[in-house]
Image: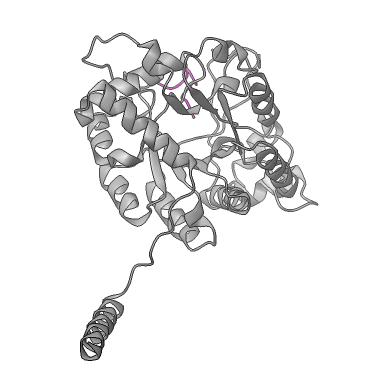
């Protein structure tokens, strides 16, 4: 999710060495794989989409309350909005599978007891996980082009105090010392993934300072029936180039979408782009406004890192998006060394048998 909190200082994002201005014809062929128009000051997202010249935008849901905003925006722009439903790791601390949980009993199971008294009054009441998952399934099933998103894992985020003025997006927000434990984040992420597997829906996944936890989650999910029939997009991927390569070797159904807003702040930005195989690369804004400008910045960065012409980039990115939306090709199971030897022996025996018959 885009870093809209003004209380945090961030390094300056990537700035292209190219002076090439945005090209409306090119933008009309590109898809923003991850955006947040309903998380800005205009909660409807209409003002953002009215100004958008992209072919399509994957509009993420993030909180328990803005799922309906995503659906409404899709109904307003059905040709250009790809609706995404799910709860972001910043906003899942209220979810519980205990129907009798009180505020105190729920939060005492996930937060340190010595910190809880100070913050209990500002935390939301517990929310039913089963009710949320039912609503999630209904939203995904009733929107044919939908994606599960934004879900994921995040070790960097501390829960903020509420804004004194909920409508003032620029208000500096003080943060508590509470961070949602990884065990709770994993539990909610995997519960949402189960819904995606049931409905065969692709996933937009957030991973910040949780690279190895993400790798382990992917390995567990790989064993689930149906996992190889969906695609997963690791958005604004925060891991190293080495982790990106490791994931690509193990998971043929994983894509990466990168943004200048998040990835562009890293000195390793261009190396990360280079580490992603060309056929797995997608573009994103990870922003709530000016989507054309953010996607164009990323388009120029990809051209520079990959050494592509504009037409090379457009063609590759169009093909990648079509592939992401399609059902993955079934993967042949990897054989052990012993199985490969037996296979070779059987093949030789079959050839010898054919020769004898001739």
Given residues 28 and 202, the one toward you in this image is 28
Q: Give residue 141's quadrant in the image.
A: top right
Q: Which residues are magenta?
A: 1-9
Which scheme is used to colour this image of the protein?
A: one colour
Location of residue 214 in the rendering, given as x and y in whole percent from the top left corner: 43, 49
Residue 206 visible (yes or no):
no
Q: Is residue 137 above or below residue 305?
A: below
Magenta-drawn stretch, dominant element (helix, strand or loop): loop
Given residues 314 and 5, the one toward you in this image is 314
Location of residue 240 in the rendering, given as x and y in whole percent from the top left corner: 29, 42
Location of residue 347 in the rendering, given as x and y in whole percent from the top left corner: 26, 80
Q: Is residue 44 left or right of residue 53?
A: right
Q: Residue furthest front?
A: 358
Given residues 323 and 43, the one toward you in this image is 323
- For image coordinates 53% across by 61% down, the residue present is 224
Q: Is residue 4 magenta?
A: yes
Q: Is residue 218 above or below residue 87?
A: below
Location of residue 343 in the rendering, given as x and y in whole percent from the top left corner: 29, 79
Residue 355 visible (yes or no):
yes
Q: Is residue 1 left or right of residue 11?
A: right
Q: Is residue 338 above or below residue 228?
A: below
Q: Quadrant of the C terminus?
A: bottom left
Q: Give residue 22's quadrant in the image.
A: top left
Q: Is residue 230 magenta?
A: no
The mark tally for this picture is: 0
Q: Residue furthest bottom?
A: 356
Q: Is residue 147 left or right of residue 273?
A: right
- For image coordinates 45% across by 26% down, the residue present is 31
């Amino acid at each position: 999710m885009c870093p809209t909190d003004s209380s945090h200082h961030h390094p300056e994002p990537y700035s292209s060495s190219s002076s090439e201005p945005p090209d409306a014809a090119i933008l009309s062929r590109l898809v923003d794989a991850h955006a947040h128009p309903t998380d800005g000051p205009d909660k409807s997202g209409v003002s953002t989409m009215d100004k958008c010249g992209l072919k399509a935008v994957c509009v993420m849901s993030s909180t328990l309350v803005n799922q309906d905003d995503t659906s409404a925006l899709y109904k307003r722009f059905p040709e250009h909005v790809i609706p995404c439903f799910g709860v972001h790791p910043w906003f899942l601390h209220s979810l519980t599978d205990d129907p009798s949980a009180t505020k105190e009993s729920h939060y005492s199971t996930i937060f340190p007891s010595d910190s809880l008294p100070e913050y209990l009054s500002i935390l939301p009441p517990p929310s039913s996980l089963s009710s949320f998952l039912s609503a999630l399934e209904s939203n995904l099933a009733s929107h044919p082009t939908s994606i599960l998103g934004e879900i994921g894992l995040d070790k960097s985020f501390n829960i903020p105090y509420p804004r004194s003025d909920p409508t003032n997006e620029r208000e500096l927000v003080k943060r508590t010392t509470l961070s949602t434990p990884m065990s709770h984040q994993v539990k909610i992420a995997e519960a949402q993934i189960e819904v995606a597997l049931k409905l065969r829906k692709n996933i937009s996944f957030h991973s910040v300072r949780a690279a190895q936890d993400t790798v382990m989650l992917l390995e567990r999910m790989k064993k689930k029936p149906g996992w190889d029939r969906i695609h997963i997009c690791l958005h604004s991927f925060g891991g190293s180039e080495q982790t990106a390569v490791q994931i690509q070797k193990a998971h043929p159904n994983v894509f990466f979408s990168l943004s200048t807003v998040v990835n562009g702040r890293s000195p390793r930005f261009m190396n990360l782009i280079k580490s992603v195989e060309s056929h797995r690369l997608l573009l994103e804004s990870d922003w709530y406004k000016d989507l054309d400008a953010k996607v164009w910045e990323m388009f120029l960065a990809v051209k520079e890192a990959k050494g592509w012409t504009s037409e090379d980039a457009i063609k590759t990115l169009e093909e990648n998006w079509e592939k992401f939306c399609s059902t993955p090709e079934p993967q042949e199971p990897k054989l052990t060394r012993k199985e490969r030897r037996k296979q070779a022996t059987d093949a030789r025996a079959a050839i010898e048998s054919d020769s004898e018959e001739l």
